[in-house]
């Protein structure tokens, strides 16, 4: 089994959201997520109930200035 390790400076999306004081709606707005219920989408990502699509993982990496790494979605 391969384990992806995060450094102490890296955080997952939920930690990022909390560090900024964002609601799920505010995080969805910050990331530019649209659709029927963008806050539900990002909530599912934050709680690791769903995996973002690769293009959204790239978007998250860019919008968080690399603080949320792709590896955080696999841990």
Image (cartoon, rainbow, N blue to C red):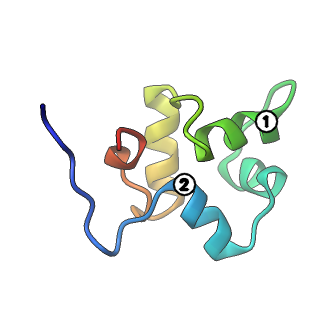
Above or below, 36 relative to 32:
above
Above or below, 53 relative to 15:
above
Residue at the spot x=53%, y=31% of the render? Answer: 52
Q: Quadrant of residue 11?
A: bottom left
Residue under circle 1?
Answer: 40
Residue 4 screen position, x and y as percent: 21, 46
Give the Cα separation between the discs numbered 2 and 1.
14 Å
Residue under circle 2?
Answer: 13
Residue 4: image tag: none
**If the image is split into quadrants, where does the C terminus sit?**
top left
Residue at the spot x=12%, y=31% of the render? Answer: 1
The outermost residue toward the right is 36
> Which label's residue is closer to the chain start, 2 or 1?
2
Q: Quadrant of residue 18?
A: bottom right
Residue 53 screen position, x and y as percent: 50, 26
Count of numbered marks:
2
The crowd level at tag 2 (other Cα within 10 Å; few <14, some 14-19, many 20+) is many
Above or below, 15 relative to 52:
below
At mark 1, the secondary structure is helix
Depth order, front residue of 35/24: 24
Residue 37 screen position, x and y as percent: 85, 31
- Please report contact status of discs 2 and 1: CB closer than 8 Å, yes or no: no
Asked if residue 42 lies left or right of residue 63, the reply is right
Asked if residue 49 lies left or right of residue 1, the reply is right
């Amino acid at each position: 089994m391969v384990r992806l390790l995060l450094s102490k400076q890296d955080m997952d999306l939920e930690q990022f959201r909390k560090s900024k004081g964002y609601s799920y709606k505010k995080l969805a707005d910050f990331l530019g997520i649209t659709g029927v219920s963008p806050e539900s989408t990002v909530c599912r990502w934050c709680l690791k109930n769903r995996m973002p699509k690769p293009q959204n993982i790239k978007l998250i990496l860019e919008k968080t200035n690399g603080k949320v790494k792709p590896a955080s979605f696999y841990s």
